[in-house]
Amino acid sequence: MVRSFYAAVESGQHGEQLAGLLADDARTVERPNLVSPSGRVSDRDAMLAASTAGARLLASQRYDVRSVLEVGDLVVTRLTWTGTVAVDAGPFHAGQQLTAHIAQFVRVVDGRVAEIETYDCYEPVT
């Protein structure tokens, strides 16, 4: 399920296209990072909206999953995410590549993503 979620986002799916992969009460806990310095907690609607905003900002993105550990309904992934910026926006400029090394703790319930807790460590942005 987690790999399917990453593949869907990589392929450009966003918003309602991802809704079927998320539990009705899904949420993301994003720990402080470059993009969200204070961190944030997002409900399902905010997750879907953020996926659409990301799809508009990025020309492409890739999830290189390096390891996966499943413990009951919890899936722990270690991955490297890369994204290529499509348009100038805030501190980002078109063509810029972003890279983050990520540890995610994803709870899967009834075959859908119920919660993502993510620790994103971005490489310096130049």
Image: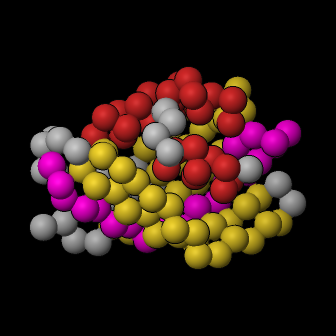
Question: How would you classify the magenta stretch by its main secondary structure?
Answer: strand
Q: Tell me the quadrant of the picture where the C terminus can be found.
A: bottom left
Q: Which residues are magenta?
A: 94-114
In percent of width and height, residue 20 lies at: 69, 29
Foreground residue among 9 and 109: 9
* Residue 57 is at least partly visible in this image: yes
* Count of number-bearing discs: 0
Q: Residue at x 87, y 60 (%)?
A: 72
Closer to the camera, 81 or 69?
81
Left or right of 68: which side holds 82?
Answer: left
Please state if 62 lies on the left or on the right of 21 as rendered: left
Residue 2 percent across, percent down from the top left: 68, 53
Residue drawn where x is 67% and y is 35% of the image: 22
**Residue extending furthest bottom?**
66
Residue 109, by quadrant, is top right
Task: Residue 114: tell me if it is visible.
Answer: no
Q: Quadrant of residue 67?
A: bottom right
The answer to whether residue 57 is above or below residue 91 is: above
- In this rendering, would 60 be left or right of 63? left
Rendered view: 104 above or below 91 = below
Residue at x 28%, y 62% (from the top left corner): 98
Q: Is residue 98 magenta?
A: yes
In magenta segment, residue 96 = yes
**x, y percent for residue 80:** 46, 69
Which residue is rendered at x = 73% and y = 61% of the image?
Answer: 75
